[in-house]
Image (cartoon, rainbow, N blue to C red):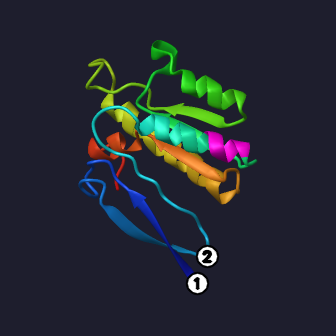
């Protein structure tokens, strides 16, 4: 079993401070994990940039957005990714912090169902790149167990 060393950086997140590099090991080229965290802009933009590069290289991209309402706020990057051939899903639309009428149990069910769906896609080799935009909010707020 061969392993390759790869690196990723966090952005003032809980996994490291000041863009500290954290070494990861991948086994048999299973892939890399990129985690973008922190306050402010750039996290979604960074992941969309990676998706565009992957699509341009002929890879299958699945982009999943959690806790966002694209139909309300008009996230144009989602439209762009669709036009380029990415599969795009929106799960657990909204968040109780922004909309008090949202049922937290419904959010938990939606997140759990989303993970089941994504696991099936991964097992069936339906994607080369999987982006889980804002999934760490689900972990932070206990809608998804780590």
Q: Is residue 91 left or right of residue 118?
A: left
Magenta extent = 52-56
Q: Quadrant of the C terminus?
A: bottom left
Q: Are marks 1 and 2 in contact (CB under 8 Å)?
A: yes
Residue ID at (50%, 16%):
74
Vertical order, 118 against 93 (above or below): below
> How far separated are the C-alphas under marks 1 and 2?
6 Å
Crowd rating for badge 2 (residues with CA inside 10 Å; few <14, some 14–19, many 20+) = few
Residue 73 visible to an observer of this rendering: yes
Q: Nearer the viewer, residue 135 or 114?
A: 135
Q: Is residue 47 left or right of residue 137?
A: right
Q: In the rendering, at what x and y percent does residue 14 appear?
A: 25, 53
Residue ID at (34%, 34%):
105
Crowd rating for badge 1 (residues with CA inside 10 Å; few <14, some 14–19, many 20+) = few
Residue at the spot of label 2? 28
Residue at the spot of label 1? 2
Q: Quadrant of the N terminus?
A: bottom right
Q: Is residue 132 magenta?
A: no
In this view, the residue farthest toward the bottom is 1
In this view, the residue farthest toward the right is 58
Residue 110 visible to an observer of this rendering: no
Mark 1 / mark 2, whichever is N-terminal? 1
Q: Is residue 54 magenta?
A: yes
> Which numbered circle lies on residue 87?
none
Residue ID at (61%, 34%):
88
Element type where label 2 sits in the image: loop
Q: In the rendering, at what x and y percent does residue 113 appear?
A: 51, 42
Question: Which quadrant of the view contains residue 16?
Answer: bottom left
Element type where label 1 sits in the image: loop
């Amino acid at each position: 079993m061969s392993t390759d060393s790869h690196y990723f950086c966090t952005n003032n997140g809980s996994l490291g401070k000041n863009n500290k590099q954290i070494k990861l090991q991948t086994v048999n080229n299973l892939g890399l994990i990129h985690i973008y965290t922190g306050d402010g802009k750039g996290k979604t933009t960074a992941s969309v940039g990676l998706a565009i590069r992957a699509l341009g290289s002929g890879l299958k991209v699945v982009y999943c957005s959690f806790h966002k309402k694209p139909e309300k706020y008009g996230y144009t990057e989602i439209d762009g990714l669709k036009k380029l051939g990415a599969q795009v899903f929106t799960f657990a639309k909204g968040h109780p912090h922004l909309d008090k009428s949202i049922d937290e149990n419904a959010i938990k069910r939606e997140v759990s169902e989303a993970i089941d769906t994504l696991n099936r896609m991964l097992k069936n080799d339906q994607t080369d790149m999987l982006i889980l935009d804002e999934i760490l909010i689900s972990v932070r707020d206990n809608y998804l167990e780590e």
